[in-house]
Image: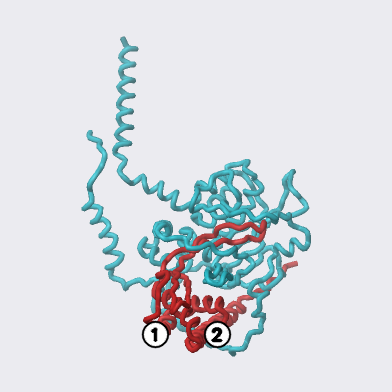
Chain colours: A red, B cyan
Amino acid sequence: MDRNRRTELLAASQSQEVRQLAETFLSERAIAEELHVICPPEIGMIMMQVREPVCRERFHLGEVVVTRAEVAIAGFRGWAVRAGSDRETALAAALLDACAEYDSKMANQVTELCDLTAQRIAADERSEWQELLATAVAFEELD
Amino acid sequence: MGYAAARGGLQAIEAAEKLVARERILGQSSWLDTDQIIEKLRLAVDRVMSEGGLWDEQLAASALRQAEGDPIEAAHLLRSYRSTLPRIAYSTPIDADDMVVLRRIVPAFRNPPGPQLLGRTTDYTGRLLHTEDDDTQRTNAEKMAAYIQENVTNFPDNDDDKNHDRSSRSPRRLLELLRDLDSVVDRRRSDDPEPFDITRHPARPPASRSARLATMARAETGALVNVWYRNILGPDGYLHEITLGEVRHGRLPVRMLHPLTGDEITVSFVRVTEVEAIEDLNGIDEDRGRFDVGYGLCFGHNEKKAIAMANLDIACERDQGRSFLEQSILLTTDGLDASGFLEHLKLPHYVTFRSMMERKVAIRQHQEASKNLESK
């Protein structure tokens, strides 16, 4: 799986699943011993710039709370950012990212989690669309 | 009479704070979870995020609970918290066209490009208060849940037709259609000025459009609606022939550059409300053969605010600083500014008032002395 896509899906995965897989990996001595936290989980903000359609100008819509973290395992760096203020899950996601770079077997497990998340998002969007379609309207003009 | 500056009172202040907390935290009803606030009081949470200028549903719900449901106070709490956080990145510029719609109506045009989706709304429903008791309302809710389960979510996994495609979820704008018809003034810029940051510097007239848009995106809903209403029907005397082009509620991606790959990634999504207001140009110095368009966009689902914002955006463009409109928007629509100034009036003003009182006494003494002189 492409690293960018992996980061996006780890950001969208359920926190419990991310933490659970990270704990599984951490139970391996090699991972625990080689783990180095480069950037401890930090809660901060991303200023959201939007390009509006009338003049094609950028403006600041507001800020979004995120938590980011960065780790390395035997020199393989892992980085993650997730919406909200969940330090533990951001750190776990960074760990999964590093593990996926470090070991191909672990990469497969991370990919499985990401695939599950992608499927869940697709199913939610289909379900959402079905509900929205029921509200599609065609107004009639009166003579 | 003794007027003096105030100090102390710490015990009374703490006791007063405890009185608030006691009822809020230890009241007779069950604990109010933030998840419950986010789900059941969605519009209030959205408003707090929008006026706080910070997207985080959990924090906004927590602020709303702490503020006992006062949205301005909750936005105040959110902004205070915001000031403790570092800004770790700017998003890459998010194109408003990337919105995935949850609701989209086009009041100006019956057959716009893409669907008209009413989405989640009570716009066409009579405002009747549900007076049934809680048990009856719960039973009705359970019936509705069963109906939805049976009729809406029961579909095959691979059912991706029925227009579940990019063009339906992110439909083409009416503005683009008007451009195709050469019916709208083209104000698209070829340069790309840096947006004004209202969190770092106060916006003052004459301001850039990015400063106005950012100010209105963070403005207090009631204040913005009031400025719009005053501008359209009040003593300011403008009567705009406004028609709404697009009213959308949907999700916008939050994107940033991945520090290790250098590529753009989607970090999350925020819900926003977007409005385009079509203005009929009729000024002597305007292109009367075309329309112009105002733009509104704010966090969360808040159509009143986005509509007022879009109307005021185009009103400012047409006004070109001739009236006090821009000043009103920039200086009087921030909820925190206005309520902060108002609330401060409750704090002890003993010294100020003592000074005023002494002046009154002095004036009276002077008046009496003058009278005595005249009578002699």
Does residue B3 sit above or below A132 in this rendering? above
Q: Do the residues labelled 2 and 1 touch (CB within 8 Å)?
A: no
Looking at the picture, do discs 2 and 1 lie on one chain? yes
Residue B140 visible in this rendered orientation of the protein:
no
Identify the residue at image location x=40%, y=57%.
B80
Q: Residue B68: name its quadrant.
A: bottom left
Judging from the image, mark 1 belongs to the subunit labelled A
Residue B85 visible in this rendered orientation of the protein:
yes
Identify the residue at image location x=38%, y=87%.
A28
Measure how far apart labels 2 and 1 are at the Cα level: 32 Å
Identify the residue at image location x=68%, y=66%.
B173
Q: Residue B5: x percent and y percent?
A: 26, 39
Identify the residue at image location x=66%, y=61%.
A53
Q: Name the residue under label 1.
A: A30
User: In the shown orientation, is residue B180 left or right of residue B267?
Assistant: right
Q: Nearer the viewer, residue A123 or B194?
A: B194
Q: Is mark 1 on a helix, strand or loop?
A: helix
Q: Residue A85: x percent and y percent?
A: 41, 69
Judging from the image, mark 2 belongs to the subunit labelled A
Q: Residue A67: x percent and y percent?
A: 44, 69
Q: Nearer the viewer, residue A93 or A32?
A: A32
Number of the front mark, 2 or 1: 1
Q: Residue B275: x percent and y percent?
A: 61, 61
Q: Residue A119 carries which label?
A: 2
Q: Earlier in the sequence, mark 2 or mark 1?
A: 1
| Viewport quadrant of the N terminus of chain A | bottom right
